Amino acid sequence: MNTLSVYNPVKIHFGTGLIAETGKIAKKYSDSALIVTGKSSMQKTGTLGRLLKTLQDAGINPTVYDKITPNPTIEQIDEAAGIAREKRIGLVIGLGGGSPLDSSKAIAVAAKGDIPVWNYLKTPAKEALPVITIVSTAGTGSEVNRYSVMTNPETAEKPGFGYECMYPKEAIIDPEIMLSMPPYVTATTGFDVFVHVFEAFTGKARNAFSSAYCMQAFYLLKDNLIKSYGEPDNIEARGNMALASALAGLAIDISGVGIIHAIEHPVSGNYPDIAHGAGLAALTVESMKYNLKACKRDFMLIAHHFGIKRAGKSDDEYAGALIEKTGEILAALNLNIGLKDLGVEKEKLAKIAGEAFTTMGFAVQNNPETAGEKEVLRLLEASY
Amino acid sequence: MNTLSVYNPVKIHFGTGLIAETGKIAKKYSDSALIVTGKSSMQKTGTLGRLLKTLQDAGINPTVYDKITPNPTIEQIDEAAGIAREKRIGLVIGLGGGSPLDSSKAIAVAAKGDIPVWNYLKTPAKEALPVITIVSTAGTGSEVNRYSVMTNPETAEKPGFGYECMYPKEAIIDPEIMLSMPPYVTATTGFDVFVHVFEAFTGKARNAFSSAYCMQAFYLLKDNLIKSYGEPDNIEARGNMALASALAGLAIDISGVGIIHAIEHPVSGNYPDIAHGAGLAALTVESMKYNLKACKRDFMLIAHHFGIKRAGKSDDEYAGALIEKTGEILAALNLNIGLKDLGVEKEKLAKIAGEAFTTMGFAVQNNPETAGEKEVLRLLEASY
């Protein structure tokens, strides 16, 4: 049996209206907080205003950094870290989807040191400011794990990194915030959860703990992924998707992602306007076909969890039925798309294939089926 | 949807031979360690010797406290805490089954303060010495959670308590150590895992996170509980039971136990020679019958996880089949026993029923079916 280590010290709070408790929670860590968020949605929905109120009520002095874009850049992270250092801020609060949450952890590391955040890809970070995450999508999983993904616009590289000091101290998961997610965001972030669970469950690094999270997440996804898209005001479906997202975030914290994420990162690294979940949607069916042989029994087990009837199906047919089901889910989410639909240029595919190995090599390694650059290029072409 | 909070900061390490790494792990915390263990089994099997060697190799000065009995007493805990204080020891290492592990956490709390450990039932503890757990049974679950159970011999009370500062820093789960468990210990501790999972899965405080651990633990129990008893040298079965025990420990850390544990604690509190798992064995079938109506769908789901065929069974029959299956498991483990077989006197039953409420009231509250003292007494009589 393989040796394993698991560790996740994040305090997870889940409940409708919980954002109003942030001040009380944050006060334990500091009297000043840097709020890291995007340009518009948290402002428009009033969520940022509610956060500012609870912090001020608790006597915490907030500074807002609201320049985080989708696929956040190292310039944004270094700029925000500079502000935190200069103002001697004691706590970072990430508010929003994957981009601000990932950034909040990178900013917390960079603020403690005096080197550009990009250098932490090679220099392990030992300390970081405390981080609280308030997640607005379901989602990224970033709210409960140590990982941060950042983009270097000069090279179009989009690597992920994560050290022990980068675990958020507390994660606030309030499904009420998620009611205002636009349909496209619900679909793409929801499908991201599906891919997290799928890759964590089938990856080489999986173990009993990551599988536990995955089984429960599959169970929640089955009934709530399409429902949360079709019934945006259904708070229970939103809540269940938020839980599935957190479970998936815990699972990938243990056992990582696979080839779908490995290829998607350079896709949206080169095309920063592509939503991560949309890139995943374009790549998933072909990647599943590629992995089918290496993890047939896992596919069968997932098919079972998704309520696909076995009937008279052979093992191969039953495993294959999961891929068909995935196609149906994508169709129901209006995400039955190829890379071409997302504006990816055919002549970029070879560059993207190479970058899957240079920036996401660990995810390729973790994939159940071995893959070289040639196979990844073929996958990209088939997903075009 | 209910509000929930989950948090478990224990670093869990699992692998054969991992005990040899303890010195390296412990060195991060202190140069001196109090080893808390029982009188004989860790000595006889050579496990204590191996632990002393890895600590000494790492330059850690070990002190051994080896007077912990099954159902450890507050005198033992206070005595060991006094030694830790006097020698200014910086780390407590629990080595063994549930009794030394529970005690190590209580000692870590008592060593930091200057009041008897019993007082911490009412006075919340804010700090404790760091604790490393090395578990020799599968098991207690104590290796990965904050709980400690102690017995007051004067009153025969056996309450549990647990504060945030009592989480072990690291848990070392080495299935090799478990190969030497005698059959009766394998059976009783293994059945304890079953009851942990059963009560955490059906309890009122359950949530998506505890259910995740339970589902995976059921899956491991199904194939390994009886096998680890019948094939004591099967390291894979031992390892899987060790993982199930840890998953169950995480589950009860979130959602607690129920009426079976609530009643068992005063049983072995009054009869300290009764193994906890044997007490549970005597009480489980009748308690399941008592809860059947309140959690029929859960019983059906567990039946499904245990591979019980639905065939033509009605819902009631399918749920009931889980109780039959539990009886079969008990028979296979040679634990098809009543309280009388364990030496419990009939005239003590009323006292025990009362103590279930005074020392384990939270567990009665958590039970799916409401129960008063009259119902608990009836359950005790039926389990006699």
Image: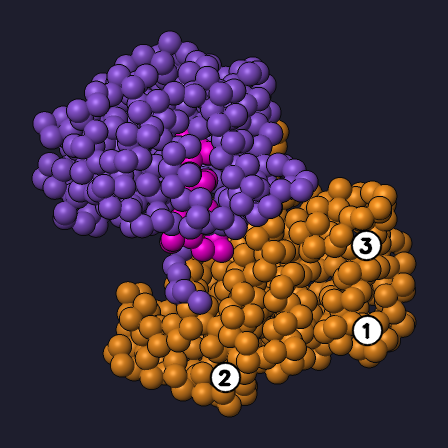
Chain colours: A orange, B purple
Is A346 part of what is drawn in magenta?
A: no
| Location of the C terminus of chain A (image quadrant) | bottom right
Q: Which mark is residue A337?
A: 1
In the figure, A370 relative to A382: above or below? above
Q: Name the residue beneath numbered marker 2.
A: A42
In the rendering, which numbered label is found on residue B134?
none
Q: Nearer the viewer, mark 1 or mark 2?
A: 1
Discs 1 and 3 lie in a common subunit: yes
Q: Image point 48% across, 27% down: which residue?
A: B327
Residue B155 appears in the figure: yes
Residue B340 located left or right of residue A198: left
Instruction: Give B357 or A2, whichever is nearer the viewer.
Output: B357
List x then y, in percent, for residue B346. Answer: 21, 23
State whether residue B373 is above or below residue B188.
below
Chain where mark 2 sits: A
Q: Residue A297: give x, y in percent of width and height.
A: 75, 42
Q: Residue B240's x, y, as percent?
A: 56, 30
Distance between the alpha carbons at the discs numbered 2 and 3: 39 Å
Q: Is residue A366 visible?
A: no
Amino acid, disc 1? Ile
Q: Identify residue for label 3.
A: A321
Q: Earlier in the sequence, mark 2 or mark 3?
A: 2
